[in-house]
């Protein structure tokens, strides 16, 4: 079964509030078998909208990625993120 991925491009506008989100999201990630492959760090924007924080999270399947996103645990964490940054996110199936 192909793995699933969250790919997020983020501009953090409130670092303290974003940390609350990131810490809370860990509960959902553990529950759904997520592995964080990239979170922040060096990058080079080649095309499109530039966002200074780029995140890639791997899940056992696309369905697990979707279930994690929709879970009560993640939605509670996400409530903290809404006032902490601008986020563009896509969930994709691997090959």
Image: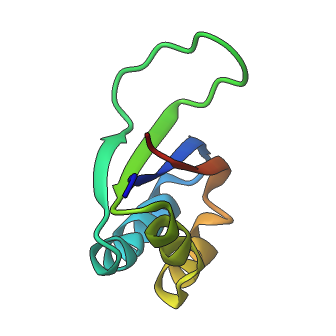
> Going 59% across and 79% down the picture, which residue do you hit?
70
Most distant residue in the bottom direction: 72
Q: Is residue 86 left or right of residue 55?
A: right
Which image quadrant: the C terminus? top left
Q: Is residue 14 above or below residue 45?
A: below
> Going 48% across and 36% down the picture, which residue do you hit?
54
- How many marks do you count on the picture? 0
Q: Nearer the viewer, residue 74 or 14?
A: 74
> Going 31% across and 81% down the picture, which residue do you hit?
31
Residue 43: x and y, percent? 42, 19
Q: Is residue 47 left or right of residue 26?
A: right
Most distant residue in the right direction: 48
Q: On the image, which quarter does residue 29 sit in?
A: bottom left
Q: Is residue 64 above or below residue 19?
A: below
Q: On the image, which quarter does residue 1 sit in?
A: bottom left
Q: On the image, which quarter does residue 26 sit in?
A: bottom left
Q: Is residue 22 above or below residue 49?
A: below
């Amino acid at each position: 079964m192909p793995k699933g991925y969250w790919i997020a491009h983020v501009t953090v506008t409130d670092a303290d509030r974003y940390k609350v989100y990131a810490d809370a999201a860990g509960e959902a990630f553990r529950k759904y078998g997520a592995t964080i492959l990239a979170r922040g760090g060096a990058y080079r924007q080649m095309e499109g909208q530039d966002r200074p924080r780029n995140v890639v999270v791997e899940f056992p399947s696309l369905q697990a990625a979707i279930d994690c996103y929709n879970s009560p645990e993640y939605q509670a964490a996400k409530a903290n993120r809404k006032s902490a940054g601008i986020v563009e996110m896509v969930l994709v199936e691997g090959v």
